[in-house]
Image (tube, helix red, strand yellow):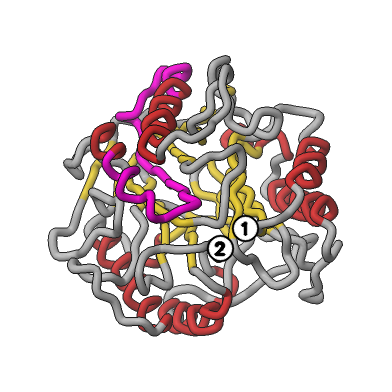
């Protein structure tokens, strides 16, 4: 059974998301610096990051967990220049030692609501069967202190880019893509795994201009590893900044054990790009979904509420193909193109989940999505009850 995480003092996007969920061995919690009794005004990025970490800890404690149980941490910044201040806070909260630090990724996005300068999305693990690891010969991306954390059969990687130890990087996207995937394979090799064991990826890039070169290089690397319909579920998100000359930062999750591809006939397939979803253990990891139809046409073009409804239906169809229902969706991440009317999205999102508790999750604004798409949503569902 899944359990809702709730603390009356916390205030992340109220009415849209539950504060968190616990099921099986994992908890999903997202937070920013808001509290129930106050709005954010002119707080520094350092102060907001510190309060965000405190809020994460408070939420986790309602589930008998704490910061030491966090194994994966995504950090979203509307102004990437704030990364230094945020890294100071992460070092103070989690320690500089990679033996105690979660897999972490910093991303410069297009915006957050509510005057937020930072939002964090955490996965915590109840299992004590954990291993933090770092490859001395491999550079760490900014904000990372380890290359990955193994929790049970899952391996969560920190964000990986192609910069060297001095921050130098070769500009072409094809070379950066090859380097990133090669580094991911090297990291997984330390766990006696490989790219073949990937069960989820996230690819952040600063523009859709790099999409063709990235896609071609990725397909070349995956050739001979995956068949066209076995590519890992992926979210390709176009954001504001990753650092000087960095055109790609990738986050990956791998699994030691059997994987099952899940594909609904009611949702378009994208062979050679990504699978709709993968079931690993008790979990269904769903690729970023949007409002693109079977003929690659954008449905409800220009209509954010309509695209939100269609996108969530796609998520529902995929979960149902695995034998579950929308009730089993415990976590979503919502990517909105900047400048949209959030109220249109919020109304459609709330209406979709009106019969039960909304999943844990968060929204963030991005520069671009697939052409014509205003929203993309990825999801995690717990299907352990179906065993």
Residue 162, image x and y in percent?
Answer: 31, 71
Quadrant in the picture for the C terminus? top right
Residue beneath the point at 39% across and 84% down = 172
Which circle, 1 or 2, is nearer the viewer? 2
Q: Which residue is mark 2?
A: 237
> From what the image shows, is residue 349 above or below residue 216?
above
> From what the image shows, is residue 358 above or below residue 142?
above
Q: CA distance from mark 1 to mark 2?
A: 9 Å
Sequence-earlier tag: 1 or 2: 2
Residues at circles 1 and 2 in contact by the CB criterion of under 8 Å? yes
Q: Residue furthest left?
A: 136
Number of other residues with Cα within 10 Å of mark 1, as a class: few under 14, some 14 to 19, many 20 or more: many
Mark sitting on residue 288: 1
The answer to which of 76 and 114 lies nearer the viewer is 114
Q: Which residues are magenta?
A: 60-88
Residue 40 at least partly seen: yes
């Amino acid at each position: 059974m899944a359990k809702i995480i709730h603390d009356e003092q916390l205030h992340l996007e109220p009415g849209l998301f539950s504060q968190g969920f616990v099921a099986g061995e994992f908890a999903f919690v997202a937070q920013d610096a808001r509290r129930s009794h106050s709005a954010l005004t002119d707080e520094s990025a350092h102060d907001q990051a510190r309060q965000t970490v405190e809020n994460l800890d408070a939420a986790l404690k309602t589930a008998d967990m704490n910061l030491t149980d966090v194994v994966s941490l995504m950090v979203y910044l509307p102004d990437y220049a704030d990364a230094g201040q945020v890294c100071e806070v992460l070092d103070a909260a989690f320690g500089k030692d990679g033996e105690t630090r979660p897999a972490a990724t910093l991303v410069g996005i297009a915006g957050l609501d509510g005057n937020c300068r930072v939002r964090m999305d955490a996965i915590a693990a109840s299992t004590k069967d954990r291993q933090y690891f770092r490859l001395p010969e491999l550079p760490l991306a900014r904000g990372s202190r380890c290359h990955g954390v193994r929790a049970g059969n899952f391996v969560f990687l920190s964000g990986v880019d192609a910069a060297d130890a001095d921050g130098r990087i070769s500009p072409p996207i094809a070379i950066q893509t090859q380097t990133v995937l090669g580094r991911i394979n090297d990291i997984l090799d330390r766990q006696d795994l490989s790219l073949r064991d990937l069960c989820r990826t996230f690819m952040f890039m600063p523009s859709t201009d790099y999409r063709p070169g990235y896609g071609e290089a990725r397909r070349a690397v995956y050739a001979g590893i995956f068949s066209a319909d076995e590519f890992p579920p992926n979210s390709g998100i176009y954001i504001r900044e990753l650092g000087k000359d960095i055109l790609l930062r990738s986050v990956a999750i791998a699994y030691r054990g059997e994987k099952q591809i899940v594909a609904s006939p009611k949702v378009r397939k994208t062979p050679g790009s990504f699978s709709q979803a993968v079931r690993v253990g008790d979990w269904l990891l769903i690729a970023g979904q949007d409002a693109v139809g079977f003929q690659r046409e954008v449905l409800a073009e220009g209509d954010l509420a309509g695209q939100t409804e269609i996108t969530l239906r796609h998520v529902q169809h995929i979960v149902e193909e695995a034998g579950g229902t929308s009730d089993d969706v415990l976590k979503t991440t919502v990517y909105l193109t900047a400048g949209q009317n959030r109220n249109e999205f919020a109304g459609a999102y709330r209406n979709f989940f009106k019969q039960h508790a909304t999943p844990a999750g968060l929204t963030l604004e991005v520069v671009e999505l697939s052409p014509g798409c205003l929203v993309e949503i990825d999801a995690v569902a717990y299907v352990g009850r179906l065993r």
